[in-house]
Image: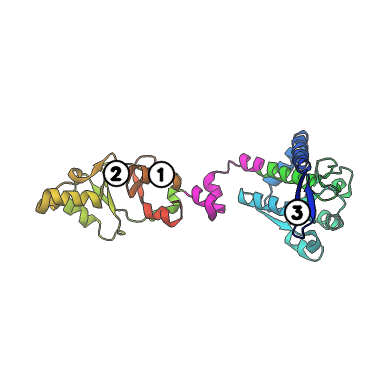
Amino acid sequence: MKSNFNGLGIKVQYDLDFARTVIEDEAKAVGSLARIIDGSFEKAVDLMCNCTGSVIVSGMGKAGIIGNKISATLASTGTPSHFLHPAEGIHGDLGRVQANDVVLALSHSGESEEIVRIIEPLKQREIKLISITGNPKSSLAKHSDVVLAMGKQVEACPLGIAPSVSTTCMLALGDALAFTIMKAREFSTEDYARFHPGGAIGANLITVGQSMMFKPGEKLPLAQTSDTIDDMFKRLEGVKRRGAVMVVNDKGQLAGIITDADLRRAMAKFDGELFAKGCTEIMTPDCKRVTAETLAAEAMAIFHKYRIDELPVVDENDRPIGLIDVQDIVAIKIAR
């Protein structure tokens, strides 16, 4: 026990051993869920994974808050989903549920009035119902197509009333469902970034292809290895102003790059003869390059390591398909 004084000057004691017990109890309960990863769990995953509509998640009270989080996790990992408040559902929002949807309902007791009242309308429309409940004999469980029965959980609060262990278990099961589906679909970091473009997570998952200024089909700043510097400038007419030109061989493969810095050095060296010089005399050969699938964060690391500002973007045959500038990445706040 640790004693402190509250704002009224009254001595209070904080039972830190009890706090540890709360965490231990919840951890133990979550660990016990491994036993229900069985045929019923697989059937639930199959229904959700093959759903041609949306996975509608519903729950009342604290279970509803957990349901909101599960729905958000599903949506951000490739499974269309939204949350249905059961009380609003019985007052018209059941119209949001379509025939090709699947409903995932959460209720520890399986007897939450609002949840029980949406069962009949769903069954009338032959909509598949999956339940996460602590009571396999409850009304919710009896009328579900698939039941994930956690077993009756003893709540961790001092009164044994406030949802705690039960909601933690629901959250863990929801994550297990969402991530099993995500893995089955081979959902990639690039896919995740498309659904989560904001914030630090999304920024770090954006690829070079998503962040570079040049788009497929646009004219690139290219020159041939046989070109003179004069030829190069003629080729750049109508090309977006960039700080570099990519030099390609007769197979269209990247041979080198000419940057503003390369040109400044060449001007000092060759003076008035610069425009007659060949691109290969000026360019930096074997330059660094990335692909469209490279994470923008990786490109930024290359910029920093080699103190360069431009990176050619090439395809699997080493042919340029774009050019990325350090400012392109700074603009999406990859830089820290």
Q: Residue at x 37, y 45 (%)?
A: 304
Whole-number angstrom distance, CA of label 2 to CA of label 1: 27 Å
In percent of width and height, residue 114 lies at: 84, 58
Based on the picture, tell me whether residue 2 belongs to the magenta stretch.
no
Counting residues from the start of the chain, the first of labels 2 and 3 encountered is 3
In the figure, 244 relative to 284: above or below? below
Is residue 323 found left or right of 183 in the rendered image? left
In percent of width and height, residue 28 lies at: 77, 36
Kindly identify which residue carries mark 1. Answer: 301
Q: Residue at x 66, y 40 (%)?
A: 180
Kindly identify which residue carries mark 2. Answer: 252
Residue extent of the magenta highlight? 179-206
Is residue 216 found left or right of 36 in the rendered image? left
Say what amino acid the circle numbered 2 marks: Gly
Based on the picture, tell me whether residue 193 belongs to the magenta stretch.
yes
Counting residues from the start of the chain, the first of labels 2 and 1 encountered is 2
Is residue 268 found left or right of 47 in the rendered image? left
Q: Nearer the viewer, mark 1 or mark 3?
A: 3
Q: Residue at x 65, y 49 (%)?
A: 73
Say what amino acid the circle numbered 3 marks: Phe
For label 1, count other residues whose C-alpha is less than 10 Å away and answer few (under 14), some (14-19) or many (20+): few
Identify the secondary structure beneath mark 1.
helix
Q: Residue at x 85, y 49 (%)?
A: 161
Say what amino acid the circle numbered 1 marks: Ala
Whole-number angstrom distance, CA of label 1 to CA of label 3: 51 Å
